[in-house]
Image (cartoon, helix red, strand yellow):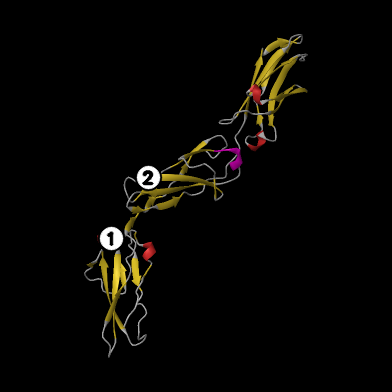
Amino acid sequence: MASRVAIFSESDLELPADHHTLTASAGTWDPATGLTYSYAWSADGMVISGASGPTFVLTAAQLGKRVTVSVTASAAGYVSASATSSPSAVVTEQITVATAPSISGKVVVGQTVTSSPGTWSVFGVSLAYQWYANGTAVKGATARTLKVSSALVGKKLTVRVTATKVGYLSAVSTSAASAAVSKAASKAALTVKPKKTTTKKKVKVTVKVSAAGVSGLTGKVKVTYGKKSVTKTLTAKAKGKVTLKLARLKKGTVKVKAVYTPTSSAAKAVKKGTSKVVKVKVKK
């Protein structure tokens, strides 16, 4: 009798926490029926004591070794014959995740979010990061931190961490998804000088528009005073600052307010902003 024998799953020999079971095929024999089989498993050519079934559960003793299985076929009226499989891949230990990575920080345009490294079953692993937005990899986002861009607005972030170490099978773990990325809140800081004046004098109004983590804001700044208003264009060169003068203020208390409306491009990153009301006392 003659045959070839193969180990099922030999391309995936690993040793996770619950171990891994290898299964041997009996092979193909002549005759094809009426046969009984016995098995003997070996590691680097040394027979493994007690490993005499068609399946074998890997243990730490096989780490770094190649496994083979020998099958002996017997049948009435025939001389028994044996065949040995090709060696398996080298048995390595599987890194496993103990605590999955998580995301911290505000998922807001201009802010920076950070991935925790997670905890792993093996000490001293090397970690690689990849950020995702709605399941799609963010190009170039392979650091532990990620600065949130306007392109990510409305999308949920995850981070995938891969742990590797020489002599071990790598492991991958993905964080839970964040909340959807939101636009940055803009602020319109209004300064009016002086706050006490006369109807014959002008007052200087300065509006400083900002959004945390976002630069080069553009748009329109509308300053309302009493029933009147004036609108000025905010350019990137202005660095968020608009200055103007108000004349012919009516006697009494005049309420001044500023509203920033971003351009269509800036609106991808920031929201509309409104200042606090500043009261100016005007005498005749």
Categorize mark 1 by other alpha carbons within 10 Å: few (<14), some (14-19), many (20+). Answer: some
Between 101 and 44, the one lying in front of the other is: 44
Could you tell me which residue is drawn at 28 percent across and 60 percent down? 65
Residue 228 versus residue 84 in the image, above or below: above
Q: Position of residue 57 (x, y in %)?
A: 30, 67
**Alpha carbon of mark 2 to alpha carbon of mark 1: how far?**
24 Å
**Number of callouts:** 2
Q: Residue at x 65, y 30 (%)?
A: 273
Mark 2 or 1: in front is 1
In this rendering, would 217 be left or right of 38?
right
132 vs 11: above or below: above
Which range of residues does the magenta coloring cover? 148-152
In x, y percent, where is residue 34? 33, 88
The answer to whether residue 88 is seen in the rendering is yes
Give the residue number, with chain letter if any, for mark 1.
65
Residue 129 drawn at (x, y percent)? 45, 45
- Residue 63: % across, % down: 28, 58
Instruction: Determine whether 276 is above or below 158 in the image.
Output: above
The residue positioned farthest toward the bottom in the image shown = 77
Amino acid type, callout 1: Lys
Look at the picture and state if 166 lies above or below 266: below
For mark 1, give the secondary structure. Answer: loop
Q: Which residue is mark 2?
A: 126
